[in-house]
């Protein structure tokens, strides 16, 4: 999966708006008006390491990385 595009899914039901993801990785995440996170969309393969780190720092485990099949 290293060289493929991927997408990120944030589970809005368990995201508690801690802000680590969009604070640290603004190319991958944005902030919703209520403080929860929104993935910015399909991401370049070069950002996979950042996405993986974001999923690891998320305190609620709300970030899921998915293969993207075009
Ligand atoms: S780090 Fe996790 S809990 Fe915090 S805003 Fe991002 S997805 Fe939500």
Image: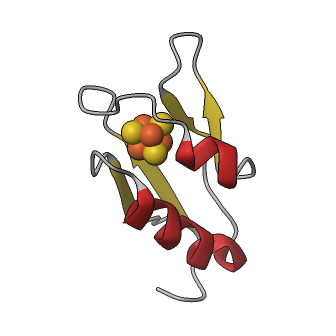
Residue visible at 28% across and 45% down in the picture:
60
Q: Position of residue 61 (x, y in %)?
A: 28, 52
Residue nearest the observer in this picture, 48 or 44: 48
Q: Is residue 44 left or right of residue 49?
A: right
Residue visible at 24% across and 26% down in the picture:
13
Q: Is residue 28 above or below residue 1?
A: above
Q: Position of residue 63 (x, y in %)?
A: 37, 51
Q: Is residue 6 left or right of residue 50?
A: left
Q: Is residue 64 above or below residue 49?
A: above
Residue visible at 53% across and 33% down in the picture:
38
> Which residue reaches farthest top?
33
Colour option used: secondary structure
Q: Is residue 59 left or right of residue 31?
A: left
Count of numbered badges drawn on the protein: 0
Q: Position of residue 26 (x, y in %)?
A: 73, 47
Residue nearest the observer in this picture, 64 or 58: 58
Residue visible at 54% across and 89% down in the picture:
2
Displayed-image quarter of ligand 1: top left
Residue 14's image quarter?
top left
Q: Position of residue 49 (x, y in %)?
A: 58, 79
> Which residue reaches farthest bottom?
2
């Amino acid at each position: 999966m290293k060289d493929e595009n991927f997408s990120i899914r944030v589970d809005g039901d368990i995201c508690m708006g801690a802000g680590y993801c969009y604070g640290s990785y603004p190319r991958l995440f944005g902030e919703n008006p209520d403080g929860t996170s929104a993935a910015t969309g399909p991401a370049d393969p070069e950002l996979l390491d950042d996405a993986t780190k974001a999923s690891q720092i998320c305190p609620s485990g709300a970030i899921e990385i998915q293969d993207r099949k075009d």
